[in-house]
Amino acid sequence: MKRAIVLLTIGISVTALMAACGSSSNTSTPTASSSAPAAGPTATQTAAPATATPTAAPSAAAVAGGWTGQYSGPFNGTFTLTWNQTGSTVNGSIQLSSPPDNLNITGTLSGNAISFGAVGVVAYTGTVSGNSMSGSYVDRANGQTGTWSATKS
């Protein structure tokens, strides 16, 4: 008899469950339509992100060797330069006529721009164009300025 009650209880529960699932309601449940195309992954082409292309620094002008020139401003005279060059770095000596002096100088080149000078004395800046260069200078002791130009000898 216990067995009959358990089976009867299970049967009633299954029947109630089935009736609940099969009952109709006002809410529709969406179903797949056989006429709709199957959804699948689509390939989308995207442009590669823009990356900056490194630009090489302009090559340094070639200035190694001897140069002769003149300067004007608070001092007027001539000079002789002797340059050694490694890449964009230059060093050498400058011999001035007035006031007479012979100084060691160092400098840098960036493309055709040049800057050089004797430590703590005079700062020269300018541009190189083939066998000539020219620019301006500043006397660091008193702030006075002048111009200079030179040609390769």
Image (tube, rainbow, N blue to C red):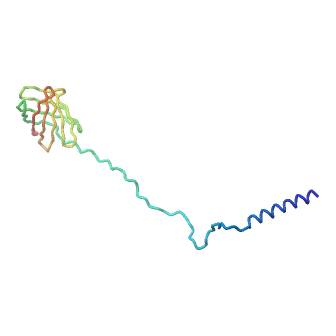
34 over 129 or under it: above or below:
below
List x then y, in percent, for residue 39.
56, 66
Residue at x 86%, y 59% (from the top left corner): 9
Residue 66 on image: x %, y %: 12, 36
Viewed as shown, does residue 12 lie left or right of 53?
Answer: right
What percent of the width, then of the height, locates residue 119? Answer: 19, 27
**Residue at 56% across, 70% down:** 37
Return the residue nearer the eye: 33 or 149.
33
- Foreground pick, 5 / 118: 5
Quarter of the view holding residue 82: top left
Residue 83 placement: quadrant: top left
At 61% across and 71% down in the image, what residue appears?
Answer: 33
Label total for image: 0
Residue beneath the point at 21% across and 42% down = 60
Q: Is residue 56 left or right of residue 144?
A: right
- Quadrant of the image containing the N terminus: bottom right
